[in-house]
Image: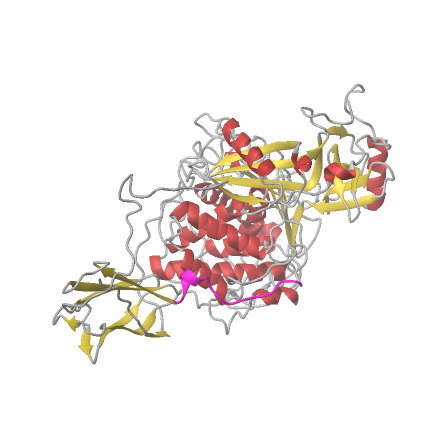
Amino acid sequence: MWRVLLSCCFLVALIATVPAAPSQVEAAAEPVPRAVDAAAETLAINHVQKSFLSLGVDRADLDDLRVTDVVTSSAGVTNVYLQQRYRGIDIFGAASNVTIGPDGTVLNVGNRFVSGVSRSRPGTVPVNTVEEAVLDAAEALDLTPSEPIVDLAPAEELRAPGPEQESEVLVSDGGISQEDIPARLVLQPTDDDLRLAWELQIVEEDGSGYWQIRVDAETGQELDRNSLVDPDSYDIFPAPGMSPDEVPQTTITNPADPIASPFGWHDVNGIPGAEFTTTEGNNVSAYADVDADNVPDPGQPDGDASLDFDSAFDPTLSPSANSGAILTNLFYWNNYVHDVFYAFGFDETNGNFQVNNYGRGGSDGDGVLAEAMDGADQNNSSFATPPDGSAPRMQLHVFNSPDPDRAPSLDNGIVIHEYAHGLTNRLTGGPSNVACLDNFEQAGEGWSDYFALMLTMGGGDSGADARPFGTYAAGQLPTGPGLRDHPYSTNMAINPHTYDSIKSTSVPHGVGSVFAAMLWEMTWALIDRDGLSTDLINGTGGNITAMQLVVDGLMLQPCSPGFVDARDAILLADQTNNAGANECLLWASFAKRGLGYSAFQGSSDNRLDGIEAFDVPPQCAPLALSVEVSPDPAVNSDYLTYTLTATNNTIGPLTNVVATGDIPSGAAFVGGSATCGGVAAGGTVTFSLGTLAPSATATCDYTVKLPAGPGTTILLSDDLESGPGHWTITHAL
C-alpha cells in the first residue's frame, strides 16, 4: 500500500476590497417572555457548584445562590444570572452569568464569584439603623439633609433578609434626594474581608448625581459607590450623526415598528388609539427642563388628533426658540432607537424601556424621561440607568457655541449614544443588575459611540472614511475633528488606536473609543464581504450581522468585562448564532488593533496591565490550505486524486495566490486531470489562483497513477477488532 503526503507552498499579498455578497442573517425574531425556567436555573446552579474548583472558590461559597434573571434569546441561547449570597444577603459585585445552549450544554460561565466567603463568616446583623446609614451616606456625598430621615417601612419588617425575603426597605428623601431612598443590606468585598453594608440609592436634588452608595453597617464609613449616570462631557468636541448641518428637515410618516411598538408611539394602555398627542408615549416622554426640576416645562409640542408634528427649525435662532423642532427630533430618535434595538433583542425580557410591556415579560413603568435643554449643566449630556422597572433619565444640556448655542437633542449621534448607555447597562449582568460597567477597562463609552455610528450609517459610506463624533453640538462643520482623539476609520493613518492605547488615553471616553475602533474594523470586514443594509430593522447585510453580534455579546459577557472578555463574548455569540461562520474574520479584525489571540487582559479593573498581540489562532492563519487524498490507503496501480482547498481568513482580499503540490516519486501525473488551470512540470503541479476575496475558498484537484509495485511491506498485522475468539487476555494478581 502507498501512503503519500503533499507538500505545498503559497504566496499571498493584500489588495483592496472586492464587491460584497448579500448576507443571509435574519432580523431578530419575536421576543421570548421572561418566565421562570426551573430547568435552566437548576442546570446553571448545579454546573457552577460542581465546577467550584475551576471557578476558584470553595464549594461552600456557592451554597446560597439567587437567580436574578433568566433570559432566552431568539437563537435559543439562555443566560441565567446568579447572585452569590451569604445567609441570604447579596455579595455586591458577585453576579455571574451561565450561558446555556439550545441543547442544554453549558457554553460559558461569566465568573465573578467571591472566594473564601464561607471561611470569613462576615456579620449579617447591622449595628447602625438605616436612618443612620442615610446620614452617613449624605455626609460622604457632601449633602445636607433639610428634613428628618424616616424609615417608611412597617416597624415590624425585618432588617436582615432570609433566603426567601427581599432586603430592600424605603426611607424618606430627607431633602437630599429627589425620590424616597431605597435601602438594603449587602456584603461589600474589601481588600481584607467582607463587610456588612447598607446600600442606598440617592438621586441628588439638583439632578447632578444619581448614586448607589454603600456604607459600613457598623462604622458608617463609606465603602464604595457607583454612579448610575453615564456622563458625557463635550466641552469642545461633542458627538456625530445626522444633524441640521448635514440633512434637511424631512417629514417621516408612520415610523413606528409594528413589532416593537404595536400600538404606535403615543400609546400606553395597549388599546388602539393614542393616549397622548404630545411628545409622550410608551417608550419615551420628551420635554424641556430649563429650570432643572425634572418636571416637564410647559409647551410640549402637540400634534393634535392627527399627530402631525411640523415645527420648523431655524438655525439662526436659540434652542429655546426652536423648542418644538428640538423636542420632536428628540422624541422621534428615542422611539426609533427603541424600535431598532428591539429587533436586535433589547426587548421586554431583557429590560428595555417601556411604560407598558403589553404582557410580554419584564417590568413595566420605565419609559425614558428625555429632558432637552436641561438647565442643571452645560456642554454635557447623561443617561441614568436604574434596574428594570424604574424609569431612566436622559439629560441633554445646551452646548455653548458661536451664536447661537446648540441643543444636542438635534445631534442624533448624542441621542443614540446616551440611549445606548441604557442598553449596555441593562444587558451586561442582566436587567436587574445595572452596576456591571464601573470598572476601568470597560467599553461603555465605546459601545455608545459604536451604536451612534451604526444608526447613522449611509449607503455610500466606506470603512476608510473619517467618521468624527460630535461635530454639531460643538459648532464644527461635519468634517471637523469631533470629540474623540481620532475620528473612527479602518484606515490606521486616520485612527491608529490599538489595545495599548488604553494605557495613555482618557477614562472613560478615550478607553471606550479604542474598543469602538475595534468594533468598527469588525463591522466593515463583514460589510465588505456581505454588503450594507440601511434598513436596520428588517434588512440583511454585514452591518446587521455585526450589530447582532455586539448586542448578543453584551448579554454573554461577565459583569465588569475587560476588552478580552468583551472580545470573547462576541466570538461566543458568533458560535451560538452562526456556528462560528465568521470566526476567522472576527479574529483578524481584533488582531489588526492588538486584541489578537495572544492578547493578555490582566485585571479588568486596571487599564495598564494588558499586553497587546496581533496574532490569530492557528485555525485562522491568513491563508489556510488543506489537502485530502482519495483513496486512502491506496494500493498498487491505483489512481490517486489530491484535493487542495485554500481559504482566505483575512478581512481583505488576497492576490497572486499560488499553490503547488508535489507528484510522488514513482507516480505519473494524469494529463488533463488538474482543475483550476493547474500545470504539471518537473514533478510539481502549480495552481495560479489569482485573487481570493475575504472568506472565499478555492478547491482544486489533480490525479496521479501509482506504480505497479512492490508497494508497502507489511511488518505486522492483527485482527483485534475482526471478531471474538481471536485474542485471549490473561492477568495475574
Residue 610 belongs to magenta span:
yes
Q: Quadrant of the N terminus?
A: bottom left
- Vertical order, 704 against 197 (above or below): below
Q: In this view, does 240 lie to the left or right of 714?
A: right
The picture places residue 250, in percent across and down from the top left corner, at 42, 51
Q: How many marks?
A: 0
Residue nearest the viewer, comparing 730 with 286: 730
Q: Is residue 243 left or right of residue 318?
A: left
Which contiguous range is marked in magenta? 609-622
Q: Can see residue 614?
A: yes
Residue 677: name its quadrant: bottom left
Residue 473: name its quadrant: bottom right
Q: Is residue 508 left or right of residue 582?
A: right
The picture places residue 667, in percent across and down from the top left corner, at 18, 71
Residue nearest the viewer, comparing 15 with 151: 15
Q: Is residue 1 left or right of residue 198?
A: left
The picture places residue 340, in percent across and down from the top left corner, at 45, 45
User: Which residue is located at x 66 percent, y 44 percent?
Assistant: 435
Q: Can see residue 397?
A: no
Q: Main secondary structure of the magenta part?
A: loop
View extreme (top): residue: 156
Colour logic: secondary structure
User: Which residue is located at x 73 percent, y 27 percent?
Assistant: 161
User: Which residue is located at x 32 percent, y 43 percent?
Assistant: 727
- Vertical order, 240 against 569 (above or below): below
Residue nearest the viewer, comparing 616 with 532: 616
The picture places residue 294, in percent across and down from the top left corner, at 68, 40
